[in-house]
Protein backbone atom coordinates (compact mmCIF):
# COMPACT_ATOMS: atom_id res chain seq x y z
CA UNK A 1 0.00 0.00 0.00
CA UNK A 2 1.26 3.51 -0.84
CA UNK A 3 2.07 5.76 2.14
CA UNK A 4 -0.16 8.86 2.52
CA UNK A 5 1.55 11.89 0.95
CA UNK A 6 3.01 14.39 3.44
CA UNK A 7 0.64 17.17 4.43
CA UNK A 8 3.04 19.93 3.30
CA UNK A 9 2.85 18.60 -0.27
CA UNK A 10 -0.94 18.54 -0.20
CA UNK A 11 -1.08 22.06 1.24
CA UNK A 12 1.23 23.36 -1.48
CA UNK A 13 -0.81 21.73 -4.25
CA UNK A 14 -4.02 23.09 -2.71
CA UNK A 15 -2.39 26.56 -2.57
CA UNK A 16 -1.58 26.31 -6.30
CA UNK A 17 -5.17 25.34 -7.13
CA UNK A 18 -6.53 28.19 -5.00
CA UNK A 19 -4.15 30.66 -6.69
CA UNK A 20 -5.45 29.45 -10.08
CA UNK A 21 -9.02 29.95 -8.87
CA UNK A 22 -8.15 33.51 -7.88
CA UNK A 23 -6.89 34.02 -11.44
CA UNK A 24 -10.31 32.96 -12.77
CA UNK A 25 -9.93 29.20 -13.44
CA UNK A 26 -12.43 26.70 -12.14
CA UNK A 27 -11.26 24.51 -9.30
CA UNK A 28 -11.89 21.36 -11.33
CA UNK A 29 -9.62 22.67 -14.11
CA UNK A 30 -7.02 23.83 -11.61
CA UNK A 31 -6.93 20.42 -9.93
CA UNK A 32 -6.20 18.76 -13.28
CA UNK A 33 -2.63 20.04 -12.93
CA UNK A 34 -2.19 18.19 -9.62
CA UNK A 35 -0.05 15.00 -9.69
CA UNK A 36 -2.25 11.88 -9.55
CA UNK A 37 -1.00 10.59 -6.19
CA UNK A 38 -1.74 13.92 -4.51
CA UNK A 39 -5.12 14.57 -6.19
CA UNK A 40 -7.58 13.21 -3.62
CA UNK A 41 -5.91 14.86 -0.59
CA UNK A 42 -5.38 18.13 -2.44
CA UNK A 43 -8.97 18.19 -3.62
CA UNK A 44 -10.27 17.70 -0.08
CA UNK A 45 -8.16 20.63 1.21
CA UNK A 46 -8.99 22.91 -1.73
CA UNK A 47 -12.76 22.27 -1.65
CA UNK A 48 -12.82 22.84 2.11
CA UNK A 49 -10.92 26.12 1.62
CA UNK A 50 -13.39 27.32 -1.03
CA UNK A 51 -16.29 26.56 1.32
CA UNK A 52 -14.51 28.70 3.94
CA UNK A 53 -13.36 31.42 1.54
CA UNK A 54 -15.60 34.11 3.05
CA UNK A 55 -14.15 33.71 6.53
CA UNK A 56 -10.57 33.08 5.44
CA UNK A 57 -10.59 36.05 3.05
CA UNK A 58 -11.84 38.33 5.83
CA UNK A 59 -9.23 36.94 8.26
CA UNK A 60 -6.38 37.47 5.80
CA UNK A 61 -7.50 41.08 5.26
CA UNK A 62 -7.55 41.60 9.02
CA UNK A 63 -4.22 39.87 9.69
CA UNK A 64 -2.16 41.29 6.83
CA UNK A 65 -1.58 44.96 6.11
CA UNK A 66 -1.03 44.30 2.40
CA UNK A 67 -2.68 41.63 0.19
CA UNK A 68 -0.37 38.59 -0.04
CA UNK A 69 0.91 37.09 -3.29
CA UNK A 70 -1.52 34.57 -4.81
CA UNK A 71 0.42 31.43 -3.76
CA UNK A 72 0.91 32.70 -0.20
CA UNK A 73 -2.75 33.61 -0.02
CA UNK A 74 -3.73 30.16 -1.32
CA UNK A 75 -1.58 28.48 1.30
CA UNK A 76 -2.97 30.67 4.08
CA UNK A 77 -6.52 29.92 2.97
CA UNK A 78 -5.90 26.17 2.89
CA UNK A 79 -4.21 26.23 6.31
CA UNK A 80 -6.60 28.68 8.05
CA UNK A 81 -9.55 26.53 6.92
CA UNK A 82 -8.07 23.60 8.83
CA UNK A 83 -7.63 25.75 11.94
CA UNK A 84 -11.23 27.03 12.02
CA UNK A 85 -13.52 25.81 14.80
CA UNK A 86 -15.01 22.44 13.86
CA UNK A 87 -12.08 21.40 11.62
CA UNK A 88 -10.60 18.31 13.21
CA UNK A 89 -8.58 16.59 10.49
CA UNK A 90 -5.17 17.81 11.72
CA UNK A 91 -3.64 18.79 15.06
CA UNK A 92 -3.12 22.59 14.89
CA UNK A 93 0.63 22.52 15.65
CA UNK A 94 1.21 19.89 12.91
CA UNK A 95 -0.83 21.93 10.48
CA UNK A 96 1.13 25.14 11.13
CA UNK A 97 4.50 23.37 10.90
CA UNK A 98 3.52 21.69 7.64
CA UNK A 99 2.21 24.95 6.15
CA UNK A 100 5.50 26.68 6.97
CA UNK A 101 7.44 23.78 5.47
CA UNK A 102 5.33 24.01 2.29
CA UNK A 103 6.13 27.71 1.94
CA UNK A 104 9.83 27.10 2.64
CA UNK A 105 9.91 24.74 -0.34
CA UNK A 106 7.96 27.02 -2.71
CA UNK A 107 8.91 30.61 -1.76
CA UNK A 108 11.31 30.55 1.23
CA UNK A 109 11.10 34.32 1.72
CA UNK A 110 7.38 34.00 2.56
CA UNK A 111 7.71 31.25 5.17
CA UNK A 112 8.09 33.66 8.10
CA UNK A 113 4.93 35.53 7.06
CA UNK A 114 2.94 32.29 6.90
CA UNK A 115 4.26 31.30 10.31
CA UNK A 116 3.41 34.69 11.84
CA UNK A 117 -0.13 34.85 10.41
CA UNK A 118 -1.07 31.31 11.40
CA UNK A 119 0.37 31.61 14.92
CA UNK A 120 -1.39 34.92 15.49
CA UNK A 121 -4.66 33.34 14.35
CA UNK A 122 -4.12 30.51 16.86
CA UNK A 123 -3.50 33.00 19.70
CA UNK A 124 -6.32 35.43 18.90
CA UNK A 125 -8.80 33.13 17.22
CA UNK A 126 -11.87 34.01 19.26
CA UNK A 127 -11.45 37.78 18.97
CA UNK A 128 -10.61 37.62 15.26
CA UNK A 129 -13.60 35.43 14.42
CA UNK A 130 -16.00 37.67 16.32
CA UNK A 131 -14.51 40.72 14.55
CA UNK A 132 -15.38 39.32 11.10
CA UNK A 133 -18.60 37.52 12.07
CA UNK A 134 -20.99 40.20 10.83
CA UNK A 135 -19.44 40.65 7.38
CA UNK A 136 -21.94 39.01 4.97
CA UNK A 137 -19.29 37.05 3.07
CA UNK A 138 -17.83 35.67 6.29
CA UNK A 139 -21.24 35.06 7.83
CA UNK A 140 -22.71 33.19 4.82
CA UNK A 141 -19.66 32.01 2.85
CA UNK A 142 -21.09 33.51 -0.35
CA UNK A 143 -20.53 36.85 -2.13
CA UNK A 144 -22.73 39.64 -0.71
CA UNK A 145 -24.61 40.09 -4.04
CA UNK A 146 -25.47 36.38 -4.10
CA UNK A 147 -26.82 36.50 -0.54
CA UNK A 148 -28.91 39.60 -1.39
CA UNK A 149 -30.37 37.93 -4.49
CA UNK A 150 -31.35 34.75 -2.66
CA UNK A 151 -32.87 36.81 0.13
CA UNK A 152 -35.05 38.66 -2.40
CA UNK A 153 -36.05 35.49 -4.32
CA UNK A 154 -36.57 33.21 -1.30
CA UNK A 155 -37.57 35.49 1.59
CA UNK A 156 -38.28 32.63 3.98
CA UNK A 157 -35.79 30.02 2.77
CA UNK A 158 -32.64 31.90 1.81
CA UNK A 159 -30.77 30.99 4.99
CA UNK A 160 -31.53 27.27 4.61
CA UNK A 161 -30.43 27.43 0.97
CA UNK A 162 -27.13 29.08 1.86
CA UNK A 163 -26.51 26.50 4.55
CA UNK A 164 -27.44 23.62 2.23
CA UNK A 165 -24.85 24.91 -0.26
CA UNK A 166 -22.14 24.34 2.37
CA UNK A 167 -22.83 20.61 2.63
CA UNK A 168 -20.85 18.20 0.44
CA UNK A 169 -23.20 16.57 -2.11
CA UNK A 170 -24.37 12.97 -1.80
CA UNK A 171 -23.44 10.38 -4.44
CA UNK A 172 -26.69 9.94 -6.37
CA UNK A 173 -26.91 7.31 -9.09
CA UNK A 174 -29.25 6.63 -11.99
CA UNK A 175 -29.63 2.96 -12.85
CA UNK A 176 -29.73 2.28 -16.59
CA UNK A 177 -33.21 0.79 -16.93
CA UNK A 178 -32.20 -0.88 -20.20
CA UNK A 179 -29.65 -3.03 -18.38
CA UNK A 180 -31.32 -3.87 -15.08
CA UNK A 181 -33.68 -2.75 -12.35
CA UNK A 182 -32.84 -0.44 -9.43
CA UNK A 183 -33.63 -3.30 -7.01
CA UNK A 184 -31.12 -5.60 -8.76
CA UNK A 185 -28.48 -2.89 -8.78
CA UNK A 186 -29.06 -2.16 -5.10
CA UNK A 187 -28.29 -5.83 -4.41
CA UNK A 188 -25.11 -5.61 -6.51
CA UNK A 189 -23.99 -2.57 -4.52
CA UNK A 190 -24.60 -4.43 -1.30
CA UNK A 191 -22.58 -7.41 -2.60
CA UNK A 192 -19.75 -4.98 -3.36
CA UNK A 193 -19.86 -3.78 0.26
CA UNK A 194 -21.44 -0.40 -0.59
CA UNK A 195 -24.39 0.89 1.44
CA UNK A 196 -27.17 2.40 -0.67
CA UNK A 197 -30.90 3.12 -0.68
CA UNK A 198 -33.52 4.43 -3.12
CA UNK A 199 -33.38 8.16 -3.80
CA UNK A 200 -37.14 8.57 -3.43
CA UNK A 201 -40.31 7.91 -5.35
CA UNK A 202 -39.85 10.90 -7.66
CA UNK A 203 -36.69 9.44 -9.18
CA UNK A 204 -37.74 5.88 -9.97
CA UNK A 205 -34.25 4.74 -11.07
CA UNK A 206 -32.35 6.77 -8.46
CA UNK A 207 -30.17 5.42 -5.65
CA UNK A 208 -27.93 7.13 -3.14
CA UNK A 209 -24.65 5.57 -2.00
CA UNK A 210 -23.68 6.45 1.54
CA UNK A 211 -20.87 7.09 2.20
CA UNK A 212 -19.87 8.18 -1.32
CA UNK A 213 -17.17 6.20 -3.12
CA UNK A 214 -15.10 6.66 -6.30
CA UNK A 215 -17.09 5.72 -9.42
CA UNK A 216 -14.54 3.01 -10.27
CA UNK A 217 -15.90 1.04 -7.31
CA UNK A 218 -19.46 1.04 -8.70
CA UNK A 219 -20.23 -2.40 -10.17
CA UNK A 220 -20.77 -2.29 -13.94
CA UNK A 221 -20.04 1.44 -14.24
CA UNK A 222 -17.76 0.94 -17.25
CA UNK A 223 -20.32 -1.35 -18.87
CA UNK A 224 -23.01 1.34 -18.59
CA UNK A 225 -25.16 -0.19 -15.85
CA UNK A 226 -25.26 3.04 -13.89
CA UNK A 227 -24.45 6.76 -14.10
CA UNK A 228 -23.85 9.49 -11.55
CA UNK A 229 -26.68 12.05 -11.60
CA UNK A 230 -28.33 14.19 -8.95
CA UNK A 231 -31.94 13.38 -8.05
CA UNK A 232 -33.30 16.74 -9.26
CA UNK A 233 -31.56 16.30 -12.62
CA UNK A 234 -33.23 12.88 -12.87
CA UNK A 235 -36.63 14.58 -13.15
CA UNK A 236 -35.97 16.02 -16.62
CA UNK A 237 -36.33 12.86 -18.73
CA UNK A 238 -39.59 11.60 -17.14
CA UNK A 239 -41.07 15.12 -17.23
CA UNK A 240 -40.39 15.46 -20.95
CA UNK A 241 -41.41 11.89 -21.85
CA UNK A 242 -44.57 11.71 -19.73
CA UNK A 243 -45.54 15.39 -19.78
CA UNK A 244 -45.96 15.43 -15.97
CA UNK A 245 -49.08 13.27 -16.38
CA UNK A 246 -50.89 15.95 -18.45
CA UNK A 247 -49.84 14.63 -21.86
CA UNK A 248 -49.63 11.23 -23.54
CA UNK A 249 -46.12 9.68 -23.31
CA UNK A 250 -43.85 10.35 -26.28
CA UNK A 251 -44.31 7.49 -28.79
CA UNK A 252 -41.41 5.32 -29.99
CA UNK A 253 -39.44 7.18 -32.63
CA UNK A 254 -40.57 10.63 -31.43
CA UNK A 255 -38.30 13.38 -32.73
CA UNK A 256 -36.62 15.07 -29.79
CA UNK A 257 -34.15 17.95 -29.57
CA UNK A 258 -31.82 18.16 -26.58
CA UNK A 259 -30.72 21.72 -27.28
CA UNK A 260 -27.97 22.18 -24.67
CA UNK A 261 -26.89 18.60 -24.27
CA UNK A 262 -23.33 18.49 -22.97
CA UNK A 263 -22.00 16.67 -21.01
CA UNK A 264 -24.99 14.45 -21.79
CA UNK A 265 -26.48 13.35 -18.47
CA UNK A 266 -30.05 14.12 -19.50
CA UNK A 267 -29.52 12.98 -23.11
CA UNK A 268 -28.52 9.57 -21.79
CA UNK A 269 -31.43 9.41 -19.38
CA UNK A 270 -33.91 10.24 -22.17
CA UNK A 271 -32.50 7.45 -24.34
CA UNK A 272 -32.42 4.93 -21.50
CA UNK A 273 -36.08 5.66 -20.79
CA UNK A 274 -37.57 5.72 -24.33
CA UNK A 275 -36.82 4.89 -27.98
CA UNK A 276 -36.35 8.36 -29.39
CA UNK A 277 -34.97 9.92 -32.54
CA UNK A 278 -32.78 12.38 -30.65
CA UNK A 279 -30.60 15.27 -31.79
CA UNK A 280 -28.09 16.33 -29.11
CA UNK A 281 -26.91 19.87 -29.79
CA UNK A 282 -24.40 21.96 -27.90
CA UNK A 283 -22.43 25.11 -28.66
CA UNK A 284 -19.23 23.72 -27.12
CA UNK A 285 -17.60 21.05 -29.34
CA UNK A 286 -15.13 19.98 -26.65
CA UNK A 287 -18.01 19.33 -24.24
CA UNK A 288 -19.81 17.28 -26.91
CA UNK A 289 -16.97 14.76 -26.79
CA UNK A 290 -18.23 13.91 -23.28
CA UNK A 291 -21.71 13.29 -24.71
CA UNK A 292 -20.22 10.86 -27.22
CA UNK A 293 -18.20 9.09 -24.52
CA UNK A 294 -21.28 8.79 -22.30
CA UNK A 295 -23.45 7.45 -25.12
CA UNK A 296 -20.69 4.98 -26.03
CA UNK A 297 -20.37 3.75 -22.43
CA UNK A 298 -24.15 3.32 -22.16
CA UNK A 299 -24.53 1.84 -25.65
CA UNK A 300 -27.06 4.46 -26.74
CA UNK A 301 -27.47 6.29 -30.05
CA UNK A 302 -28.18 9.91 -30.91
CA UNK A 303 -27.21 12.40 -33.55
CA UNK A 304 -24.65 14.72 -31.95
CA UNK A 305 -23.99 18.16 -33.40
CA UNK A 306 -21.99 21.26 -32.43
CA UNK A 307 -23.95 24.46 -33.05
CA UNK A 308 -25.36 27.50 -31.32
CA UNK A 309 -29.01 26.63 -30.71
CA UNK A 310 -30.00 30.22 -31.51
CA UNK A 311 -28.56 30.03 -35.03
CA UNK A 312 -31.37 27.81 -36.30
CA UNK A 313 -30.64 28.05 -40.07
CA UNK A 314 -27.11 26.73 -39.39
CA UNK A 315 -28.27 23.37 -38.02
CA UNK A 316 -32.02 22.68 -38.46
CA UNK A 317 -33.21 20.39 -41.27
CA UNK A 318 -36.69 21.91 -41.26
CA UNK A 319 -38.48 18.93 -39.63
CA UNK A 320 -40.35 19.99 -36.49
CA UNK A 321 -39.80 18.32 -33.11
CA UNK A 322 -42.30 16.47 -30.92
CA UNK A 323 -40.40 17.55 -27.83
CA UNK A 324 -37.54 19.83 -26.90
CA UNK A 325 -35.39 19.82 -23.78
CA UNK A 326 -33.80 23.22 -23.19
CA UNK A 327 -31.42 22.69 -20.26
CA UNK A 328 -30.14 26.22 -20.61
CA UNK A 329 -26.77 27.68 -19.60
CA UNK A 330 -27.24 29.35 -16.22
CA UNK A 331 -25.56 30.63 -13.07
CA UNK A 332 -25.34 27.07 -11.65
CA UNK A 333 -26.45 28.55 -8.34
CA UNK A 334 -28.43 25.34 -7.67
CA UNK A 335 -25.39 23.06 -7.91
CA UNK A 336 -23.27 25.32 -5.81
CA UNK A 337 -22.60 22.64 -3.15
CA UNK A 338 -21.06 20.46 -5.88
CA UNK A 339 -19.03 23.34 -7.35
CA UNK A 340 -18.47 25.77 -4.46
CA UNK A 341 -16.02 27.78 -6.59
CA UNK A 342 -18.83 28.93 -8.89
CA UNK A 343 -20.12 31.49 -6.39
CA UNK A 344 -16.69 33.16 -6.28
CA UNK A 345 -16.07 32.97 -10.04
CA UNK A 346 -19.40 34.48 -11.06
CA UNK A 347 -20.00 38.23 -11.20
CA UNK A 348 -23.45 39.66 -10.62
CA UNK A 349 -23.33 41.15 -14.13
CA UNK A 350 -23.11 37.59 -15.55
CA UNK A 351 -26.71 36.95 -14.53
CA UNK A 352 -28.23 39.50 -16.94
CA UNK A 353 -26.15 38.04 -19.80
CA UNK A 354 -27.27 34.49 -18.95
CA UNK A 355 -30.91 35.59 -18.75
CA UNK A 356 -30.55 37.13 -22.22
CA UNK A 357 -29.06 33.93 -23.69
CA UNK A 358 -31.80 31.82 -22.08
CA UNK A 359 -34.58 33.99 -23.54
CA UNK A 360 -32.91 34.03 -26.98
CA UNK A 361 -32.73 30.22 -26.90
CA UNK A 362 -36.41 29.98 -25.87
CA UNK A 363 -37.47 32.32 -28.66
CA UNK A 364 -35.34 30.59 -31.30
CA UNK A 365 -36.38 27.02 -30.43
CA UNK A 366 -40.09 27.46 -29.73
CA UNK A 367 -41.11 27.71 -33.43
CA UNK A 368 -39.36 24.36 -34.11
CA UNK A 369 -41.93 22.52 -32.02
CA UNK A 370 -44.88 20.76 -33.71
CA UNK A 371 -48.31 22.10 -32.76
CA UNK A 372 -49.21 20.07 -29.64
CA UNK A 373 -45.50 19.54 -28.91
CA UNK A 374 -43.86 20.10 -25.54
CA UNK A 375 -40.76 21.99 -24.38
CA UNK A 376 -39.15 21.41 -21.02
CA UNK A 377 -37.15 24.42 -19.87
CA UNK A 378 -34.64 23.62 -17.11
CA UNK A 379 -31.91 25.43 -15.23
CA UNK A 380 -29.81 24.33 -12.28
CA UNK A 381 -30.38 27.75 -10.77
CA UNK A 382 -32.14 29.07 -7.70
CA UNK A 383 -32.37 32.62 -9.04
CA UNK A 384 -35.89 33.67 -10.05
CA UNK A 385 -34.54 35.69 -12.99
CA UNK A 386 -33.40 32.45 -14.64
CA UNK A 387 -36.52 30.47 -13.74
CA UNK A 388 -39.88 31.84 -12.63
CA UNK A 389 -39.38 35.34 -14.09
CA UNK A 390 -37.82 34.04 -17.30
CA UNK A 391 -40.85 31.83 -18.01
CA UNK A 392 -43.38 34.49 -16.98
CA UNK A 393 -41.79 36.85 -19.54
CA UNK A 394 -41.76 34.12 -22.21
CA UNK A 395 -45.47 33.37 -21.69
CA UNK A 396 -46.17 37.08 -22.20
CA UNK A 397 -44.24 37.08 -25.48
CA UNK A 398 -45.66 33.78 -26.71
CA UNK A 399 -49.45 33.47 -26.32
CA UNK A 400 -49.40 30.01 -27.98
CA UNK A 401 -47.47 28.61 -25.02
CA UNK A 402 -49.16 27.15 -21.95
CA UNK A 403 -47.31 26.22 -18.80
CA UNK A 404 -48.34 22.85 -17.31
CA UNK A 405 -48.30 22.19 -13.63
CA UNK A 406 -45.45 20.04 -12.32
CA UNK A 407 -46.62 18.09 -9.26
CA UNK A 408 -44.40 18.52 -6.20
CA UNK A 409 -42.61 21.57 -7.56
CA UNK A 410 -43.36 24.43 -5.23
CA UNK A 411 -42.54 27.56 -7.22
CA UNK A 412 -39.27 26.28 -8.55
CA UNK A 413 -37.59 25.21 -5.41
CA UNK A 414 -35.84 21.95 -5.09
CA UNK A 415 -32.61 21.67 -3.21
CA UNK A 416 -33.82 21.46 0.36
CA UNK A 417 -34.51 18.29 2.27
CA UNK A 418 -38.12 17.32 1.74
CA UNK A 419 -40.04 14.16 2.44
CA UNK A 420 -40.02 12.90 -1.14
CA UNK A 421 -36.22 12.63 -1.26
CA UNK A 422 -33.88 10.39 0.72
CA UNK A 423 -31.22 13.13 0.58
CA UNK A 424 -31.31 16.84 -0.36
CA UNK A 425 -31.15 17.37 -4.11
CA UNK A 426 -29.51 20.10 -6.14
CA UNK A 427 -31.56 23.24 -6.80
CA UNK A 428 -33.34 23.08 -10.17
CA UNK A 429 -36.08 24.92 -12.00
CA UNK A 430 -38.38 23.19 -14.48
CA UNK A 431 -41.14 24.62 -16.66
CA UNK A 432 -43.11 22.32 -18.96
CA UNK A 433 -44.58 24.28 -21.86
CA UNK A 434 -47.20 23.02 -24.30
CA UNK A 435 -47.51 24.50 -27.78
CA UNK A 436 -51.14 25.13 -28.76
CA UNK A 437 -52.54 23.24 -31.76
CA UNK A 438 -53.13 26.25 -33.99
C1 LIG B 1 -26.50 23.17 -18.01
S1 LIG B 1 -25.42 22.67 -19.27
C2 LIG B 1 -26.30 21.32 -19.95
C3 LIG B 1 -26.21 20.05 -19.14
C4 LIG B 1 -26.72 18.83 -19.87
N1 LIG B 1 -28.07 19.01 -20.37
C5 LIG B 1 -26.68 17.57 -19.03
O1 LIG B 1 -27.69 17.16 -18.46
O2 LIG B 1 -25.60 16.96 -18.94
C6 LIG B 1 -25.65 23.92 -20.46
C7 LIG B 1 -24.99 23.66 -21.79
O3 LIG B 1 -25.42 24.66 -22.70
C8 LIG B 1 -24.41 24.85 -23.65
N2 LIG B 1 -24.71 26.12 -24.36
C9 LIG B 1 -24.50 27.38 -23.94
N3 LIG B 1 -24.96 28.26 -24.84
C10 LIG B 1 -25.50 27.53 -25.85
C11 LIG B 1 -26.12 27.86 -27.07
N4 LIG B 1 -26.31 29.13 -27.42
N5 LIG B 1 -26.55 26.85 -27.87
C12 LIG B 1 -26.35 25.56 -27.53
N6 LIG B 1 -25.75 25.19 -26.37
C13 LIG B 1 -25.33 26.16 -25.54
C14 LIG B 1 -23.14 24.83 -22.84
O4 LIG B 1 -22.03 24.53 -23.65
C15 LIG B 1 -23.46 23.74 -21.81
O5 LIG B 1 -22.93 22.51 -22.22
Image (cartoon, rainbow, N blue to C red):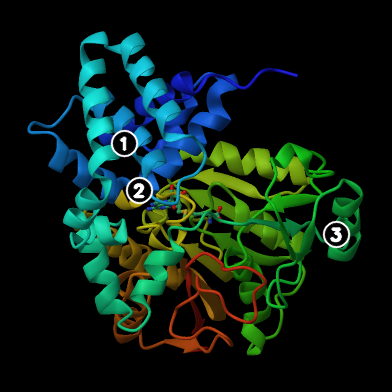
Viewer-closest of 379 and 13: 13
Viewer-closest of 344 and 378: 344
Say which mark, if any, is on residue 255.
none
In the image, farthest residue toward the left: 65
The earlier-in-sequence mark between 1 and 2 is 2
Give the distance between the C-alpha atoms of the residues marked 3 and 1, in whole angstroms.
Answer: 40 Å
* Quarter containing the N terminus: top right
The earlier-in-sequence mark between 2 and 3 is 2
Location of mark 1 (residue): 77
The residue drawn where x is 28% and y is 64% is: 355
Q: Is label 3 or label 1 in front? A: 1
Tell me the SS state at disc 1.
Answer: helix
The earlier-in-sequence mark between 3 and 1 is 1
Q: Residue 31, image x and y in percent?
A: 46, 29
Tell me the SS state at disc 2.
Answer: loop
The residue drawn where x is 30% and y is 38% is: 122
| Ligand 1 has an atom within 8 Å of the beta carbon of the residue at disc 1 | no
Say which mark, if any, is on residue 52.
2
| CA neighbours of label 3 inside 10 A, class few (<14), some (14 to 19), many (20+) | many
Does residue 57 appear in this view? yes
Q: Residue 372, image x and y in percent?
A: 56, 84
Residue 217 horizontal side relative to residue 81, left or right: right
Give the distance between the C-alpha atoms of the residues marked 2 and 3, in whole angstroms.
Answer: 35 Å
Viewer-closest of 52 and 346: 52
Q: Residue 419, image x and y in percent?
A: 63, 82
| Ligand 1 has an atom within 8 Å of the beta carbon of the residue at disc 3 | no
Q: Are marks 1 and 2 in contact (CB under 8 Å)?
A: yes
Location of mark 3 (residue): 186
| CA neighbours of label 1 inside 10 A, class few (<14), some (14 to 19), many (20+) | many
Q: Quadrant of residue 141?
A: bottom left
Q: Quadrant of residue 367?
A: bottom left
Amino acid sequence: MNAAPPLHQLLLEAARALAALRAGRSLTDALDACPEGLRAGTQALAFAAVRAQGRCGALIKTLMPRPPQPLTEGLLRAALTQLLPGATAYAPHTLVNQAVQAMKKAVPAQAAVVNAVLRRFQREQEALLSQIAQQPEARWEHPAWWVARLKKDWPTQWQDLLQAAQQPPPLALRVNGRQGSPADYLARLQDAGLAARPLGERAANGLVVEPPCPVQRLPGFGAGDVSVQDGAAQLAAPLLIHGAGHLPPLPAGARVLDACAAPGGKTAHLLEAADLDLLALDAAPERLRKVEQTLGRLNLQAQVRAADGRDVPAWWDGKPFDAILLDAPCSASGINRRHPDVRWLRRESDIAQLVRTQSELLDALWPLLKPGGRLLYATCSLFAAEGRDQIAAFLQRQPQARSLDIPGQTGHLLGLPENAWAVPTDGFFYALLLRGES
